[in-house]
Amino acid sequence: MKRHYLKALIISASLILTSLGISFADDHKRGGTLIASMGSNPRHLNPAVQSGIATGFPGSQLFATPIRYDNNWEPQPYLAESWEITDGGKTVRLNLVKDAVFHDGVPIKSSDVKFSLETIQKNHPFKTMFGPVIAVETPDEHTAILKLSQPHPALMLAMSSQLMSIIPEHVYGDGQDPATHPQNSKNVVGSGPFKLVEFKSGEHVILERFDDFFIKGRPYLDKMVIKIVTDPAARTIALENGELDFYAFENVARNVVRLKKNDKLEVTSKGYAAIGPIDWLAFNTKRGKTADVNVRKAIAYAIDRKFILKAIMLGVAEEARTGIHPGSPLYDPNVETYEINIEKANQILDDAGYKKGDDGMRFGLTVDFGWPPLRPNAEYTKAALKRIGIDITVRPSADFPTWARTVSNHEFDLTWDTVFNWGDPVIGVHRTYQSSNIKKGVIWSNTQQYTNPKVDAILEKAGKEIDPEKRKALYSEFQKIIVDDLPVYWTNTLPYHTIYNKKVGDPPLGIWATSSPMDMTYIKK
């Protein structure tokens, strides 16, 4: 993605502090407790075997990764103090920090890196992250050498954030299933800046400073209390009255607008470029009327993206024109935008032979939605498509699993959804458009059943290309094709915002938000 894919890199351990842009001004004070919140209950705290931002927030504090990223999408040292990429990108040598220990005092060794990566390969749902890694060699305790079957441009991002948590082999190698291991939630032995005090499901996660963290002098905070508050209104009130200091991933537009008016709070959309959340209307491309690209294009011309941005998202979200997030260096906005054009939409349907009946309707379709905040989008779709003679039935699901079953089994016409890019297209974009990923019963696979051999070929090539300019050109071509084929109509980024009290210094506003370590966050005195 960046120049680190072009040649072998060796980064000095001294960069651990300086290259992250860390300020050592007097206002970086040690001590204090951060009262934070998250909006959903994590199943457990081990990101090595579980995706999702609920696990990622506490998990990124409990477990370190080999690499971390700065705000400019550049990899920086973390548990790996330096690295070297050779053999045309098929060999990656990680040189680990030599004095790093787990929370129980056991040294972190290269064998733990090998064990962690293999555990992730077997258990994590993002199979493409480390798909090309065929072996991990450990010539000594502080060197891990990743061997790949092909160059893998997503590898550096996959070794950061919550995606490659280093877990202890002496704990998880005891024969129990890592996915259900009891120490995923209790007596967690991590490698990160904070250690677990208590995880009480549905209530809180309490963390405290790990004094033997391998970056000396950090973390700054004594403690983090992460309250689990699922009610957005209650969370908003708590932020306003000072009961909460910090909350990330706020996506309720009216709450963002409301909190921006509070002069004690900072409200920012910075920090979510790698998370890459996009709202979209997905089509079943193999069943019924939506199998016809003409129908899909007519629907796109009838959906007013600007209305969604202004009236539903209240101006706090960003336009998204393709399946790659606008915050990504690989995003190409120079595509067909399907500006609202009811006359053109009607003409497309007329020309395709879908004539209106006496009631003014051509045919009926259903629209589902994956998350309660997307209900307004679904209701708007019903009103918008009535103008072109499509009778929409909005189908609420009883709960998320019900919706996931419906969509993953391809039993839908249209569905609104929010899907993440997860940093690199290989990790979070390819899965939606590759024909090889049409997997019945698997949500967030190619549930649209979209098939285009040219797209398959481009993604196959882009997934191996390490030259950033060539890669960008490939993804530009890819975006133009899918915008023309329209397996999905993309409307906007999810309006994720971070809200924090102004007494909080250096909150996590990099590309991974709270799916990154908060060892630099502090309380101003």
Image (cartoon, rainbow, N blue to C red):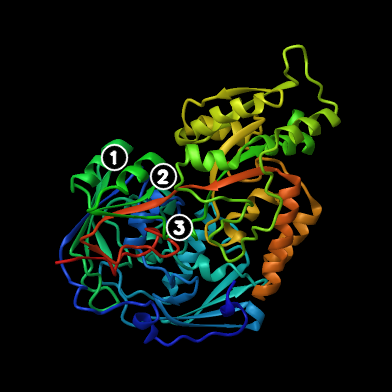
Q: Residue at x 40, y 66 (%)?
A: 166
Q: Position of residue 72 (x, y in %)?
A: 48, 72
Disc 1 and disc 2 in contact, CB within 8 angstroms: no
Question: Residue 427 lies in what quarter of the image?
Answer: bottom right
Q: Which residue is mark 1?
A: 202
- Number of marks in picture: 3
Q: Residue at x 36, y 77 (%)?
A: 21
Q: Which residue is mark 2?
A: 251
Image height check: is 328 above or below 467? above
Q: Which residue is mark 3?
A: 272
Left or right: 185, with 132 as reference point:
left
Left or right: 343, with 418 as reference point:
right
Q: Amino acid at mark 3?
A: Tyr
Q: Please state which of residues 298 and 208 is positioned toward the viewer in this rendering.
A: 298
Number of the front mark, 3 or 1: 3
* Crowdedness near tag 1: few (<14), some (14–19) or many (≥20) residues, C-alpha within 10 Å: some
Label disc, if present, on residue 464 of the rendered structure: none
Q: CA distance from mark 3 to mark 1?
A: 25 Å
Q: Position of residue 414 (x, y in %)?
A: 64, 32
Question: Residue 344 lies in what quarter of the image?
Answer: top right
Disc 2 and disc 3 in contact, CB within 8 angstroms: no
Q: Is the C terminus in the top left, top right, bottom left or bottom right quadrant? A: bottom left
Disc 3 and disc 1 in contact, CB within 8 angstroms: no
Q: CA distance from mark 1 to mark 2?
A: 20 Å
Q: CA distance from mark 2 to mark 3?
A: 12 Å
Q: Amino acid at mark 1?
A: Gly
Q: Earlier in the sequence, mark 3 or mark 1?
A: 1
